[in-house]
Amino acid sequence: MAVHRTVRVQHSATHPDRGAITLDGDTLTLVGEVDHGLVARWTAEAPADVTATTVDARAVTFLGSAGLALLAGLARATSSRVVLLTEQRVVTRPLTVTGLDALFEIRPD
């Protein structure tokens, strides 16, 4: 039985609206700018054994290489294909260019 937990990491105390990563149960939600700074905070503060079956990236405004690495690592750590909720070109384009889109079932919502 999976343990339900909620973890939220914001970009910074001075810029909380710039971006956030939230784990709620088996859904990881990405908001705003998912860049090196945000992913570094997530890596430092989130549990090491995070798995998610769904990633909600509908509110992402920027996805940097650290965000791509986060998504790839999450997909590779999960035994089933991860559902990625997004229509955002800033998310789908880098995934397609790098071939990482094959790791996800991409849905608009």
Image (spheres, rainbow, N blue to C red):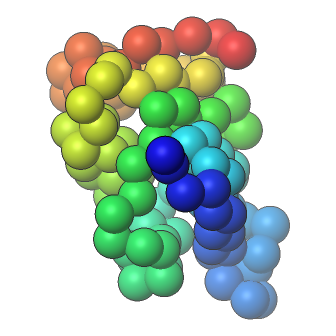
Count of marks, rendered view: 0
Q: Compare residues 99 and 71 and report the one nearer the observer.
A: 71
Q: Residue at x 60, y 23 (%)?
A: 85
| Residue 90 shown left or right of residue 67 in the figure | right
Q: Residue at x 42, y 13 (%)?
A: 105
Q: Quadrant of the C terminus?
A: top right
Q: Residue at x 76, y 89 (%)?
A: 14
| Residue 93 shown left or right of residue 107 in the figure | left
Residue 91 at x, y percent in the picture: 49, 30
Q: Is residue 9 above or below residue 19?
A: below
Q: Is residue 13 above or below residue 61?
A: below
Q: Is residue 24 above or below residue 105?
A: below
Find the residue positioned furthest to the bottom. Answer: 13
Residue 80 at x, y percent in the picture: 31, 23
Find the residue positioned furthest to the front. Answer: 1
Q: Compare residues 108 and 45 and report the one nearer the observer.
A: 45
Residue 19 at x, y percent in the picture: 67, 62
Regarding residue 43, the answer to whether it shows in the image is yes
Residue 98 at x, y percent in the picture: 20, 27
| Residue 109 shown left or right of residue 81 in the figure | right
Q: Residue at x 51, y 24 (%)?
A: 84
Regarding residue 72, the answer to whether it shows in the image is no
Q: Quadrant of residue 81?
A: top left
